[in-house]
Amino acid sequence: MRLVRELDVVPLAEGVEHPDEAAVCRDLGFQLFQGFHFGRPAAAPRYFGAD
């Protein structure tokens, strides 16, 4: 995490599937999160209103 901050990169935690994982990543300093804990994949029409 120190190297990421030195490079001025925003840290992203991928594959977060459980609340406990999210908490640990947050404690480690991650700023962005991605994974099933936050939402499941969905077809584009759901978001864009297309059929």
Image: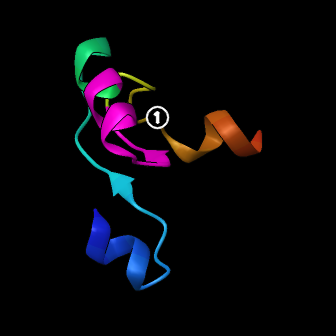
Instruction: Provide the residue designation for mark 1.
Output: 42
Q: Residue at x 41, y 86 (%)?
A: 7
For the residue marked with disc 1, what is the amino acid?
A: Ala
Taking the view exactly as shown, the residue that stands out farthest to the top is 19
Picture mark count: 1
Image side of residue 50 versus residue 28, left or right:
right
- Residue 33 rendering spot, x and y as whole percentages: 42, 43
Query: To which quarter of the image does residue 26 belong?
Result: top left
- Residue 42 rendering spot, x and y as whole percentages: 46, 34
Query: To which quarter of the image does residue 35 belong?
Result: top left
Name the quadrant of the C terminus: top right
Query: To which quarter of the image does residue 18 belong?
Result: top left
Q: Residue at x 50, y 80 (%)?
A: 8
Let me know if residue 7 appears in the view: yes
- Residue 34 rendering spot, x and y as whole percentages: 39, 43
The magenta-colored residue range is: 23-35
Taking the view exactly as shown, the residue that stands out farthest to the right is 49
Let me know if residue 51 appears in the view: no
Task: Residue 11: say if magenta.
Answer: no
Q: Residue at x 32, y 13 (%)?
A: 19
Instruction: Kindly state the secondary structure of the residue where label 1 is placed.
Output: loop
Asked if 37 appears above or below 51 in the picture, the reply is above
Name the quadrant of the N terminus: bottom left
How many residues crowd around disc 1 within 10 Å: few (fewer than 14), some, or many (20 or more)? few
Image side of residue 32 versus residue 13, left or right:
right
Task: Residue 28: say if magenta.
Answer: yes
- Residue 40 rendering spot, x and y as whole percentages: 39, 27
